[in-house]
């Protein structure tokens, strides 16, 4: 199990390291490749560590739920604001690139497993997992908007230093993340951490630290590095604290 997870994590890290060193269509291809590797990593880890029911619950909540909320968002403007996707991320269904719900699935699993480590009680774990997942969007959206992969029609008010993305989008992310984690918790597929979760915790830490570095140094997005560094750090950095019995 661990060998599979570590191998996929290594491939994902390699793709992400290459991203800022490329441009144009190559970047779009690396974006798609990263998401595909990421979803394979999370779903396979869920299956191998907790069984088919866990993998099915992850896919049902994050992938199908993610597609549903994105399709509603594109059609109605709720809950993320009025936006649309370009054609650079591959085929679409109902206006949504098919890799987008895969991205929700990829990151929902490490967010939940990390929350099991740093929070006590169901409500606290939902809050930490949802907050961490929503804060990841402080890195994701500025990067993707800068690349032209999607855009908002009326991106105001925006966070200082992060134009092009309305504040309401982040609130929409938080609302859906709370719903997603609440359903995932109610499924009772995993309620305690396990030694085999280490690759997923490494993914969560890598995502945070590499995003801060990439935005601050390579992608010329210092404001999103700061916003994401502070707010996602609230959910991620407690993982570095030694556990007590």
Image: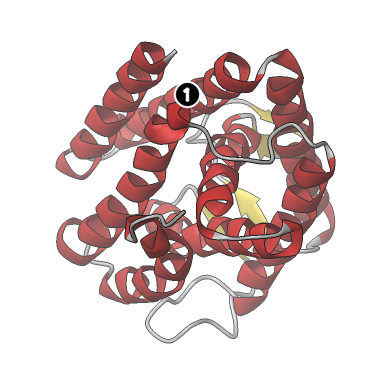
Tell me if residue 55 comes above or below residue 93 in the rendering.
Answer: above
Quadrant location, the N terminus: top left
Determine crowd level at label 1: few under 14, some 14-19, many 20+ residues with C-alpha closer than 10 A: many
Is residue 81 among the parts visible in the rendering? no
Q: Give the labeled residue for mark 1.
A: 41
- Percent of width and height locating residue 129: 60, 56
Callout 1 secondary element = helix
Q: Residue furthest front?
A: 245
Give the residue drawn at x 56%, y 53%.
115
- Percent of width and height locating residue 119: 58, 60
- Percent of width and height locating residue 102: 60, 32
Coloring basis for residues: secondary structure
Give the residue drawn at x 15%, y 40%.
21
* Circle count: 1
Closest to the observer, 68 or 115: 115
Q: On the rendered structure, is 187 left or right of 126?
A: right
Q: On the rendered structure, is 93 left or right of 31?
A: right
Q: On the rendered structure, is 236 left or right of 94?
A: left
């Amino acid at each position: 199990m661990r060998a599979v997870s570590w191998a996929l994590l290594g491939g994902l890290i390699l793709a992400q390291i290459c991203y800022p060193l490329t441009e144009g269509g190559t970047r779009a291809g690396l974006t798609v490749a990263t998401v595909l590797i990421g979803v394979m990593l999370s779903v396979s880890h869920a299956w191998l560590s907790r069984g088919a029911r866990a993998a099915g619950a992850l896919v049902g909540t994050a992938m199908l739920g993610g597609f549903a909320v994105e399709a509603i968002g594109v059609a109605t403007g709720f809950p993320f604001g009025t936006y649309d996707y370009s054609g650079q991320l591959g085929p679409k269904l109902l206006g949504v690139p098919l890799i987008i719900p895969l991205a929700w699935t990829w990151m929902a699993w490490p967010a939940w497993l990390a929350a099991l480590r740093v929070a006590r009680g169901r409500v606290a774990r939902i809050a930490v997992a949802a907050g961490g997942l929503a804060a990841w969007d402080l890195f994701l959206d500025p990067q993707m908007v800068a690349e032209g992969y999607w855009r908002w029609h009326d991106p105001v008010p925006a966070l200082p230093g992060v134009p092009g993305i309305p504040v309401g989008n982040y609130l929409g992310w938080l609302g859906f993340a709370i719903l997603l984690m609440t359903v995932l918790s109610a499924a009772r597929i995993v309620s305690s951490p396990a030694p085999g979760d280490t690759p997923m915790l490494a993914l969560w830490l890598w995502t945070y630290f590499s995003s801060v570095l990439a935005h601050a140094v390579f992608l010329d997005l210092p404001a999103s590095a700061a916003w994401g560094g502070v707010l996602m750090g609230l959910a991620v950095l407690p993982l570095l604290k030694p556990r007590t019995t």
